[in-house]
Amino acid sequence: MEHRNLIAVLCLISAFILPINAELKYVDASRLTLIGKVMPTPENVYHRVDTVKYNDMPFQVKRLFTHSAGLVVSFKTNSPTVAARWTTKGKGVMGNVTPICDRGLDLYMNDGGKWIPVGAGTPSAGKAEQERVITKNLKPGVHRFLLYLPLFEEVRSLEIGVDEESFIEAEPSPFRHTVLMYGSSILHGACASRSGLAYPARMSRNTGINFVNYGLSGNGKMEAAVADMLKDIDADAFILDCMPNPSPEEITERTQYLVNTIRKYHQGTPIIMIETYMRENGYSDQAVHDRCTRQGEAFVKQYELLKKQGIKDLYLIRDNHAIGTDHEGSVDGTHPNDLGFDRMVEQYQPQIMRILKKYGIK
Amino acid sequence: MEHRNLIAVLCLISAFILPINAELKYVDASRLTLIGKVMPTPENVYHRVDTVKYNDMPFQVKRLFTHSAGLVVSFKTNSPTVAARWTTKGKGVMGNVTPICDRGLDLYMNDGGKWIPVGAGTPSAGKAEQERVITKNLKPGVHRFLLYLPLFEEVRSLEIGVDEESFIEAEPSPFRHTVLMYGSSILHGACASRSGLAYPARMSRNTGINFVNYGLSGNGKMEAAVADMLKDIDADAFILDCMPNPSPEEITERTQYLVNTIRKYHQGTPIIMIETYMRENGYSDQAVHDRCTRQGEAFVKQYELLKKQGIKDLYLIRDNHAIGTDHEGSVDGTHPNDLGFDRMVEQYQPQIMRILKKYGIK
């Protein structure tokens, strides 16, 4: 009862502070430019992977690929207001992320060549359907926008609203090339406070390179069926940030098939392996410390074996306390917070860009 | 129905990954040391203010003072496991913060003189009662802990669990002096990812000074009844971070009474006014920009008037883009994320400490 009261109060507050303009018109976001996809997904345009075609992947992997992590709508409008109506499959909450990150929207506007966040679509509790004015009172003129979709939900529908007398049009992606990133919940975006702060999203805005998010919360385990899907992707580079989820034994068993499969179908394309930092709770929990240490050893050993076998264009980014040394860069002992992600970007991005530059990806 | 299924799944997952040790014993946290309080609160030890005694304050102010923001339990134990059972008044969710911040717990351990976070108490969805193992597998020895309470909820009960054969004892507060901070949601802790990352909490661990959190989400409006309550508080310094909530007109009407009341009852005690940064959505929303500008002008003008009137020991910290200049330091356009808080601490803390030092508060 109390929960329901809270929902009612939140809805009232939302209605009060975010009045939906009756004069808005809505367009289906699928008619605009959708960035972050590297294959068609007939079942739902907001899926990352065609899970019907790649049906052999584990159930949880397929479910997570229906999440819209890393998908971004690119458009321009002269409207002083931008609103959205959207529906997600789930309406629950996760304990360690904000609902904005989980089921909400994150709007950036180009301001003199720089992308700045101008409003979040904060979801109401207990509802799958949302409607929000995300930004308003913009100065006159045509503005370019990037709307980041939810990180941990399947989006069922999305419409973007502008003032009735304004225009809204698809805008080309501002990002070049395709760098496919496959990996863990950290890559997926847990626990950024909003979707535009996931680390591939930050690196894309920083560099202009299209870093595609194939993060799978808890499930970046390098299964053979996932490797077989990745080989079909036409990417300029592959980044593997998948050390945290598989056991040390699974890392030993699976890394070679993953790397060799990508290499076989993409000769001359760089493959970058990222060694994950020690989990923050590994500094106190001795069992976690031991597991992380063994995962890291197994991952680095597989890299060295692959190099010895003559695999070319393979790189390893070693961990150097990627989320900082003050121990404040994590939400829950496992996942970075926005401070941790900021430090990760600072550490990873220049190393990644140095490698990509050798291949003309710049 | 779907929501209920999700809750069931989350509970199952929690039960699986966090088995509660049957051999734990629990002690009531109120028998340990409770830091962050500056007055007795007979109604509930986890309130910040005695809202029965100070009954004239607005309803929302009194409600928010029942939140346990800034309260910390200090204890030591030789247990390799630390668990908690706790109950909050509400069980809902806020759109812009994590449930960990809202209703959860945040445990720090002293590691060679430094406080490091060692585990979060992540609440289950839709429940007011929680039980969690927060850290485990600690190396042998006696460890000192700080357990940060929820930022946005009233705590109804709290017990700390340790292994049955271990001891748990109250540990004195590691923090000196009392610096009372009164203000907005930003001070309250929105939108830190967990309670130990609210900026007064960070400054306390950094400096050893007890910064007491009287932040009131949306309600740090300098009402006369609040000023009349603050005058009774025996603090070594007062910091007023209350620019964001009152209108420019309210700032003009209320600042003098607040400062003069504190000054009258606390001669020679420093009072520091903090000018809040431009809201991030003020860089796009012209109406927000105008309001923030007028709030800042009113706040600074009141400071200057008070100085002209001869009020001594009064200081102003001017804003210098406190949450950074890349526009990524906010969750929702208003509240800092952990990155924004990190930058705020970097900017505010040295300025505050320079002032406090003049008064022997160091």
Image (spheres, coloured by chain):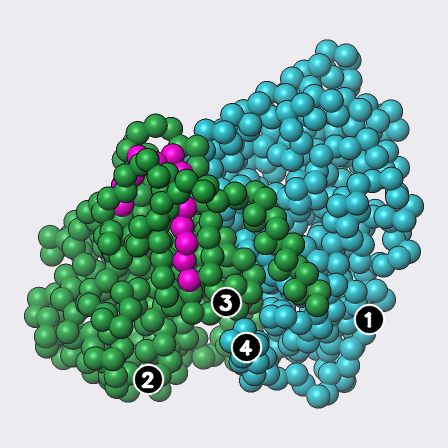
Chain colours: A cyan, B green
Where, by quadrant of the figure, is residue A55 drawn? top right
Query: The residue marked by circle 4 belongs to what chain?
Result: A
Measure the alpha-carbon separation of dots 4 and 2: 25 Å
Task: Quarter of the image for the C terminus of chain A: give it.
Answer: top right
Q: Is residue A321 visible?
A: no
Answer yes or no: are tags 4 and 3 on the same subunit: no
Q: CA distance from mark 3 to mark 1?
A: 35 Å
Expressed as whole percent of the image width and height from the top left, the position of residue A261 reads 84, 27
- The image position of residue B217, as x and y in percent, is 40, 71
Q: Nearer the viewer, mark 4 or mark 1?
A: 4
Q: Are marks 4 and 2 in contact (CB under 8 Å)?
A: no
> Which mark's residue is nearer the viewer, 1 or 2?
2
Report which residue position mark 2 lands on. Answer: B58
B109 or A335, which lies in front?
B109
A5 relative position to B70: left or right: right
Q: Amino acid at mark 4?
A: Met
Mark nearest the camera among 2 and 3 is 3
| B293 on left or right of B4 | left
The residues colored magenta run B75-87
Q: What's under tag 3, amino acid-wise?
A: Lys
Observer-side mark, 4 or 2, equals 4
Task: Answer whether residue B250 is visible to the viewer in this image.
Answer: yes
Residue B93 image position (x, y, % from top left): 53, 67
Under mark 1, the amino acid is Asp
The residue that disc 4 covers is: A1
Q: What amino acid is at disc 2?
A: Pro
Give the spatial CA distance, label 4 vs label 3: 10 Å
Residue under label 1, please give it.
Answer: A28
